[in-house]
Amino acid sequence: MAVVAAFVLLTSCIALASVLAMRGVLTNQLDDQIKGSMRAVLLGYVTTGDADVQGAQTNPEYGQIYAGTSFVFLHDGEPVTAGTLNGASPEVLSDENLERLVDGSTVGTCQTVSLTDGMGDQRVCTYPAAVNGQPFGDLAVALPLRGTYQTLLALSFVIAVSVFVAALALVALGDVLIRRALRPLTSVIVTTERISQLPLDTGEVQLSNRVRVSDPATEVGRVTESVNRMLEHIESSLEARAASERKVRQFVADASHELRTPLAAVQGYAEITRKHDASLSDDARESLGRIEAAAHRMSALVNDLLLLARLDEGTEIDRESVDLSLLVIDAVADAQVAGPDHPVALELPEEPVEVVGDLMRLQQVVANLLANARIHTPPGTHVEARLSTDGDDAVLEIADDGPGVPAELQATLFERFVRGDASRSRAAGSSGLGLAIVRAIMTAHGGSIDMRSAPGDTVFTIRVPLVASAAPAGSDRTD
């Protein structure tokens, strides 16, 4: 647009100069016409005899008198005769126009004056006149500038239209050239949009897309080359990260697998020792109980780590039709037994809710969420399990009226080894892997888990795809 504005400004200046130059040319031509007709006016309407006008461009044919010619003959500076020639005899000039012609007349020059009565601007030339070789006075002859103005107006219109058309052509040409020059950027946009839709946070990512490089000598070509180099750098960084994650997962899996055997041995020896409980001292029995509890917690932690490692590796889960309604009923019953000081309300739809998934893993998800509500809230907290459907998904909400999750923990609550124990009071130990396992299992099922929390209202929501043939849920019932 700056180029177009500069073009319009430049052409406007040229057009203005052209119009002003043409105005000067046309005015000079009009002056020549006036001077050429002055002797004829003098002989035809002022005097007879051998008349002449000094400085006027007279000719033997006395020149041509044009329609609309006005004249004033001055003797000793006073008008003697005057009129406007539009026919056989002169028309009388009004006193005001006569005064304007006289006032605008300077002997030996041509000037522009403005007349009334619709006569408009006039070009008037005044020169000394002589008859029979004797000074006879001064003759002022005027012609309308209407024709000159019309010519200038037409010229201005043509120039304006030409500038407008040229500007449009320049805009169109510039648009074509710019689009052609920036066309390679379309490939950059498409490529970057595809990459922006890729999940880059975890796992292996293939950044095989590259931008086709146009002319590397142009700015756009250099941009595309820079984008490709950036993509190569990102790809290598993601590959390094993926390799590091694989090593970590492999280490966790191997360590978890190797730890299972010594843990099983510890638990086995503890059970054998427990058979001789009568011969043990009180301190020995207490120590043995601590060993059994620690071994049990360590075994559960190892199993959780091994499960996460397998899910991270993309291990296939069992996929079958699961009645989520029955699963939730059983999980709530177990939670009531495990935590009688945390009453659990159950809300189910009338029709069974069937999903596609791994029964054991889905049981683990619901059990973990109910245990999370029980462990991290004080006694007397009310828990509610609400099952419903939403489109093609089954929706399970586990809500409690406990103190809520601290705001600073909500963004990382589903990360591994994150605990919300600071404000949600603990009744038992927590490894910090429960919610991470829930998210991993839901991801493996093609579902999701979300959480919103405020004091007195914490809700965990999971969504699992329904069985395609499952009937839609009807009205709710409350148990």
Image: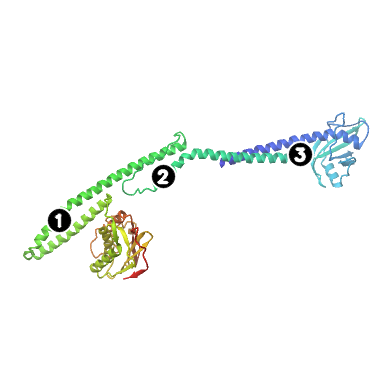
| Crowd class of label 1 (few under 14; some 14 to 19; many from 20; radius 10 Å) | some
Disc 3 target residue: 148
On the image, the x and y values in percent for residue 390 come to: 38, 61
- Residue 453: image quadrant is bottom left
Mark 1 or 2, nearer chain start = 2
Structural distance between the alpha carbons of marks 2 and 3: 63 Å
Q: Is residue 312 left or right of residue 291?
A: right
The residue identified by callout 1 is 264
**Residue 376 in view:** no
- Can residue 205 be seen? yes
On the rendered structure, is 274 left or right of 459? left
Query: Helix, strand or loop at disc 2?
Result: helix
Return the x and y of residue 116 as percentages of the image width and height. Answer: 82, 47
State how far apart marks 1 and 2 are (Cα).
52 Å
Task: Please name whichever residue, 426 or 447, is drawn nearer the observer in this view of the structure.
Answer: 447
Q: In which quarter of the image is the C terminus?
A: bottom left
**Disc 2 vs disc 3: which is toward the camera?**
2
Q: Which of 414 and 386 is in front in this view?
A: 386
Distance from disc 3 to disc 1, alpha carbons, whole Å, reads 114 Å
Q: Which of marks 2 and 3 is nearer the N terminus?
A: 3
- Residue displayed at 7% across by 66% down: 278
- Tag 2: residue type? Thr
Q: Residue 409: give x, y in percent of width and height.
A: 32, 59
Residue 240 lies in quadrant: top left
- Disc 3 residue crowd, few under 14, some 14–19, many 20+, Cα 10 Å: some
Q: Name the residue under label 2.
A: 192
Assess whether mark 3 and mark 2 are in contact (beta carbons under 8 angstroms). Answer: no
Front residue of 145/199: it is 199
Q: Which residue is drawn at 87% across and 44% down?
A: 93
Q: Nearer the viewer, residue 353 or 231?
A: 353
* Amino acid type of the residue tagged 3 in the rendering: Thr
SS state under label 3:
helix
